[in-house]
Image (tube, rainbow, N blue to C red):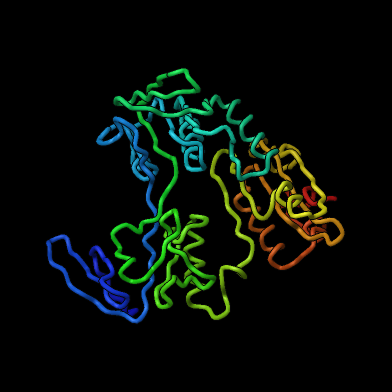
Amino acid sequence: MNSGAELEVAEASFVDENTLKLSYADGDSKLVKGERFFINTGSTTVIPPILGIEGNEHVYTSETLMSEERLLKRLVVIGGGYIGLEFASYYRNFGSEVTILHRGHDFMGREDKEIAQAVLANFGRREINIIFDAEVESMNGGAVSYFVGEEKRTIEGDAVLIAVGRKANTAGLGLDNAGVKLNQRGEVIVDEKLRSSNEHIFAMGDVKGGLQFTYISQDDFRILVQDGRTTQNRGAIPYSVFIDPPVSRVGMTEEEAKAQGLQVMVRSIPASSIPKTLIFDRREGMMKAVVEKGSGRILGAHLFAARSEELINIVKLAMDAGLGYQVLKNQIFTHPSMAESLNSLFGF
């Protein structure tokens, strides 16, 4: 079936609010005009200004490390964010020696504190070395020099993963020419219908900032084509951090709920209490639920357990449907399954 779309492989930049210049690899270019434009250029890895990083064959990003066919004996990760934690977990499972150089001291600061501490303890048992308050100074091949306070140290890796964050791909788009405003992080500012400061130019996916997941970009498309759907009414957004076992979350943490003045009930269970974890020997982790007192409204769920990336979607559905925690407490789930853990987790 012909969709009517035409694909152009070229670099695009705005000449004015109605005109794009397309520049091709062979040096040719042309102008195209349109009534509406949709920017979905994604994001790219931030490369910090570290001496010796440029042109260093030992340096990888999350994209290039995915293509590495060697089994690395030693991996050094610069950055303690979610991408860095995921690759650290992968490679430790492969048998690599892994060290994370984390600039701060707040581990998984976005997450519930109990969950973050459980993950930190898990990494310790797995001998994933995390060096906090590490300020990287320079690189020489696979050798990374860094400071912890006044003490200078050096660590050697067969590969060094740069995982200090991602930035929106807005450079070179000529957005000033189209009257499209950016925030301080260089991301396109949009409203709840994804309109930029120019009403006929829209932005979707990573380029507009916020949570950077494939499914957010997919739902942004729904907002553009469905009447009434906005970023404000698409419901709770779940996400997973694919360490081993995964951490999955939807809604508020206990701390966030209390900061909003809500009266909460909190319940935690160990993953080892779930029969299914005994069957496939994945007993590591814990689960935590946050519920509003009185109303029974589910405020949040934080799952550090096998298959949590699947379970969190059930909780999201209940939250979006306005169902009280009692529905999950009393729901009949198959046995043995990870889903039946929700009976216990919401068993207030």
* Residue at the image point whose x is 64% and y is 29% from the top: 121
* Residue at the image point whose x is 52% and y is 42% from the top: 82
> Which of the two residues, 255 or 157, is positioned nearer the viewer here?
255
What is the x, y in percent for residue 320? 68, 66
Q: Is residue 281 visible?
A: no
* 252 w.r.t. 127: above or below: below
Q: In the rendered image, which quarter contains the N terminus?
A: bottom left
Please, which residue is most extreme toward the right here?
Answer: 294
> Which of the two residues, 93 or 125, is positioned nearer the viewer here?
125
> Which of the two residues, 140 or 88, is positioned nearer the viewer here?
140
Please tell me how many numbered marks the rendered image carries.
Answer: 0
Q: Is residue 167 left or right of residue 15?
A: right
Q: Is residue 65 visible?
A: yes
Q: Is residue 99 left or right of residue 32?
A: right
What is the x, y in percent for residue 223? 52, 73
What is the x, y in percent for residue 17? 32, 75
Find residue 47 and report its image quarter.
top left
What is the x, y in percent for residue 228? 58, 79
Find residue 291 and report its image quarter.
bottom right
Find residue 326 and report its image quarter.
bottom right
> Which of the two residues, 331 or 4, is positioned nearer the viewer here?
4
* 214 w.r.t. 68: above or below: below
* Residue at the image point whose x is 56% and y is 68% from the top: 231
